[in-house]
Amino acid sequence: MQRYQLFCLISLLFTLPGCAQENIPDPDRQIAEAVSAAPEDMREAATVYGYTNKGKLSLIREGTNSLICLSDDPNREGFQSVCYHKDLEPFMTRGRELKAAGKTNLEIFDTREAEAKAGTLKMPEQPTTLHLLEGKTGHYDAASGEVKDAQYRYVVYIPWATAESTGLPIQPVVPGGPWIMDPGTHRAHIMISTPGN
């Protein structure tokens, strides 16, 4: 009995990578998932990053406009696709590097804050937008080409802005109303959530 259990365990260990590979959608589907967060008129020309069989985020389509989109991570529960202006790429890339290095969210924030203040992390000089489509039970429906059970959130990055400089509240006044998060920091941004978030 013990020998059989050991055989099953070894078989499971060797088949897991294959199972994981089967869960990675093909590039066309990843592109469709990624650009679902983008404005319709910007989808066709957006740059898209998706996931390889090893779970690594990689370029799968070079775009020609200002938008960069990330496909849903197949190893993450629910659904999330993100599109953002190309001027946010240094900020986003640095965050992914620090996360891969095992840093906590607070450590990532503090590191990028210090680097942005030192000028070694380039932040956008103008307001720049991130489009987010996510849902805990969200999923991409290949038949309709649409994402189901997910809501939009818009984030407009305005580094170093404050409630005083923008006239925005630091909490939403009404459901879905704009407000400023992380005011006075490199990551200051306007949050706009659609109903249901």
Image (cartoon, rainbow, N blue to C red):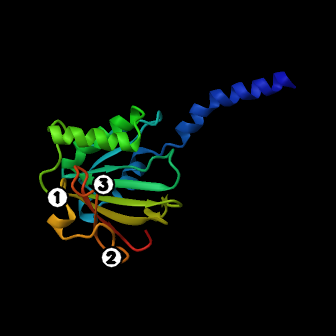
Residue at the (16%, 50%) spot, across then down: 124
Look at the numbered disc 2 and give the secondary structure of its residue. Answer: loop
Q: Relative to the observer, which residue lies in front, 157 or 162? A: 162
List the single residue furthest toward the bottom.
174
**Residue 18: assigned label:** none
Q: In whole angstroms, how far apart are the C-alphas of marks 1 and 3?
A: 15 Å
Residue at the (25%, 59%) spot, across then down: 189
Q: Which residue is identified by label 3?
A: 83
Q: Is residue 63 visible?
A: no
Sequence-earlier tag: 2 or 3: 3
Q: Which residue is identified by label 2?
A: 173
Circle 1 or circle 3, nearest the eye? 1
Q: Is residue 141 left or right of residue 82?
A: right
**x, y (%) of residue 48?**
31, 47
Residue at the (53%, 51%) spot, across then down: 77
Q: In whole angstroms, how far apart are the C-alphas of marks 1 and 2?
A: 22 Å
Q: Amino acid at mark 2?
A: Val
Q: In whole angstroms, how far apart are the C-alphas of marks 2 and 3?
A: 26 Å
Q: Which residue is identified by label 1?
A: 127
Residues packed near mark 3 inside 10 Å, few (<14), some (14 to 19) or many (20 plus): many
Rendered view: 102 above or below 61:
above
Q: Amino acid at mark 1?
A: Pro
Q: Is residue 25 left or right of residue 69?
A: right
- Asked whether the residues under the numbered discs 2 and 3 touch, taking CB atoms below 8 Å apart as contact, a structural biologist would say no
List the single residue furthest toward the right.
1
